[in-house]
Image: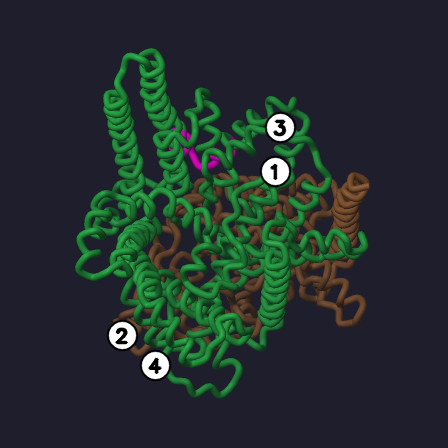
Chain colours: A green, B brown
Amino acid sequence: MALCSVPFIIFCIVLLLLYFAAPRRFQWIILLLASMVFNAFCGIGAIALLLVFALITYISTQAIGRIYAEGDAYIAANKETLPREERKKYKQTLKGRAHRILIAYVILLAGCLAFFKLVPIFEESGLNMSVIAPLGVSYYTLQCIGYVTDVYRKEVTPERNYLKVLLFVSFFPQIVQGPISGWENLTGEIFASHEFDGKSFSYGFYRFLWGFFKKMVIADTMSPYIQGLFANYHDYHAPTLMIGAFLCMLRLYADFSGYMDIVCGLCQMMGISLTENFRQPFFSHSLTEFWTRWHISLGAWFRNYVFYPVGKSGMCKAIASKTRKKLGDPFADRLPMTFGLFAVWILIGLWHGINAPFVLWGILNGLIMIMTNWLDPVYGRLKKALRIDPNAAYWRAFTCIRTFILVSYLEVFSDVGTLKDGVGYILSSLTNTWAVRSLSDIVPYVNPGSPGEMHNLLVVIAGFAGVLAVSIRNEMLKKKDPGSDRDVRDDIINLPILLQSVMLAGIFMLIVLIGVQSAVSNAGGFMYANF
Amino acid sequence: MREVSCMRTSDRGIKAILIAALGVIVCSAVMIGIFFRSELFYYQDIALRDKLAGTVDTIVIGSCQDKFGFVPKVLDEELGCVSYNLSGIHAPLYGQIALMEEDLSRNPVDRVILGVDYDTLAYTSRGIKAIGDTKIIPRLNTPAERLGYFFHNIHIEDYDIIYSQYINAGLVCTKGLLTGNRPQGVPYEARGHYCLPANDMSLVSDDPAAEYQTFSLETDIIEDNDRLLSDLIRLCKDKGADVIMVMTPASDSYVWTYGGWDTVHGQLKQIADENDIMFLDFNLYKSKGELFDDRTSYEDKWHLSDTGSEVFTREFSDILKMVESGEDVTGLFHEDYETALKCSPYAGTK
């Protein structure tokens, strides 16, 4: 079921009515049924895979839980007779058994994910497999692995109800493109009972509508222009291609964060808080900070389940201690971080797609972060020598713009298509002619003679201005009070009711007048759903 | 106090949403109402068809190619009839049936010219192509018929595009009414024909031979289009009308660059034979090269221009007269596209 469609809106209305009408202890069952219905639109295969993934996850967590429970019971029963060393050894044996289950589980699920990611490559090489990757498999695979790892680490207790595990795996607002939630975070929300709350509902609705605006009016309207630019980049002026790279990044933001606003808004209407995936990413001062503000749940997942385990692994520790004596503490201290980042970014690249542009995109991201970290003391000295105040407004603005340009170019690299095209686009944006004679040389994809295209351009610019204004306000509120969850909606709700209504109706009409046409022309899919 | 303030916040939000929803519903009703009532668009012809009711004896039905291709005025002059071009832009077959049901019931129709195109059987009205439905609905007589058509034929996933189209059209109408710059409705003289200026459609290529059949027509029949086409023929015949199936000419460059014409022709011919009606494919007309020129006869690759349509309608009328007088016209047409393409202006390059 497409999110930007009438059936989805009807689905949401029915869900909200049922959710609040149902007895509170059955509300999670309504969510489970809704998730099954939503996934059924993707075909029986998608549902079957979810059921199997949930079952394997359930069995694995139960097995790990039983090992721990048996061990605890044995130790409790023999506490006085069993020597401390024996107990420790016994615990290690148990941990080893649990570890083997975890490893087998990770290999199985990651293998499935790799298989689905490899299908396009097999098909390109002429092997007709007739297999389509089920919707959201990249997201719920990570979510499942995270849950089982948490059980193994004894951070959560294994859930005994299979249906609850199934809901955790298949919760429909997350299935298309995340967020990737941890067990505690998500289940604390979806299994709790929620009463109708006017504030939550209206805040959720505002966000829901804003999400459709971002996706349909901004992202979908820009798509054909960007596709045209990517397809014929040889023919355009260098400034056009540069602007195209920035627009590509902004479109991705409007698309992805628009989706997040839709699903978080819907959940908030029900009183459910979903993990946030974005926190004003274009206010980042470095690539490292960017990745703590962009696709937050993916970054958090890889930090928890790849970065730390790699950094703290025995091999990493051994290499660090061997080099410590020869090359000193600063060198050795940075090694775990380097190995961790490298592993994370190779895997993030592969997670996006098993092809050269994504792998290289991942490696480049990782290398830049690693280099930034290694060269941090040099930068510090350089800034001091040049008398640059890192907190000065001009420097902060410069670092924001620098980061935006960097992430835009990295994104273009993986978005254009093949590796050759990615490199070609970037080189063309620097080496093609800079001799701009008119505005249409810079934005040739908008025909000034077409009133429709000019209207759309104006709406997109106004839309971006709106998104920017919202981001600035949210950033200001976060700066003022980092602990609070205040955002721009707290300002809007205090406006005169009629003005609020006009704003809501205006946004809705823009979606109808511009967004629907653009979404239909682009088939309305979400970019990150392809991963 | 804190609770009271919280209550107020929640009330304000809900109230704003409800007022906005009410505003949207009222605005939508007004916009759509203005569009339906004002009949300002070139395809809105309820008033005109109402005026002609009881007089029309020849109807042209089909989609864009036929709306642009058949000139009723010329048909009237040549055949001595009272004709109307009922064809619709992107009109799906079930839409053509709905329009025909209305006009057959109020006119003494004895001749139906059924326009078919390269995509008649492959056409799907889903997604962006649901625009065809948005142009059929305002041509149906009563609100009940429009609602019936909407709920019966439009897929729920296309409701948004239909709604969007009508709000857009309503805005254009409102703006036109307010500024006095009204869009053109259907003029009486045109009687359903829509006139397009010519554009040069010649193949822009140094090597036309390399362009030969580089694309392919869609030859998979969608859903039950073949059944609907037969239903449409049967509907006309049941009302006592003679039906002739016609394919208007497409530009030579289009016919040259696309493959699959013989398959499409065969599919349509089979339906014509099954229903015992004549099928004239003007892409196979032996004199096509003399009558039509890619530089002046077409608006785009698929649609005849104003000059092209006039020439075509006169030529078609002559052929129809011959058919109706019992003459065999099959010799005027090539047997298949393979033969016809040998006479294409681009054939010398192959």
User: Tag 3, which secondary structure?
Assistant: loop
> What segment is highlighted magenta in the picture?
A37-50
Closer to us: A86 or A19? A86
**Disc 4 marks which amino acid?**
Thr
User: Tag 4, which secondary structure?
Assistant: helix
**Disc 2 marks which amino acid?**
Thr
**Distance from Cα at disc 1 to Cα at disc 2:** 60 Å
Residue B310 included in the magenta stretch of the image: no
Q: Position of residue B308 (x, y in %)?
A: 52, 71
* SS assignment for the magenta stretch, majority: helix
The residue labelled by disc 1 is: A12
The residue labelled by disc 2 is: B349
**Distance from Cα at disc 3 to Cα at disc 1:** 18 Å
Crowd rating for badge 1 (residues with CA inside 10 Å; few <14, some 14–19, many 20+): some
The residue labelled by disc 4 is: A431
Q: Nearer the viewer, mark 1 or mark 2?
A: 1
Closer to us: A19 or A401? A401
Pointer 1 and pointer 2: residues touching (CB < 8 Å)? no
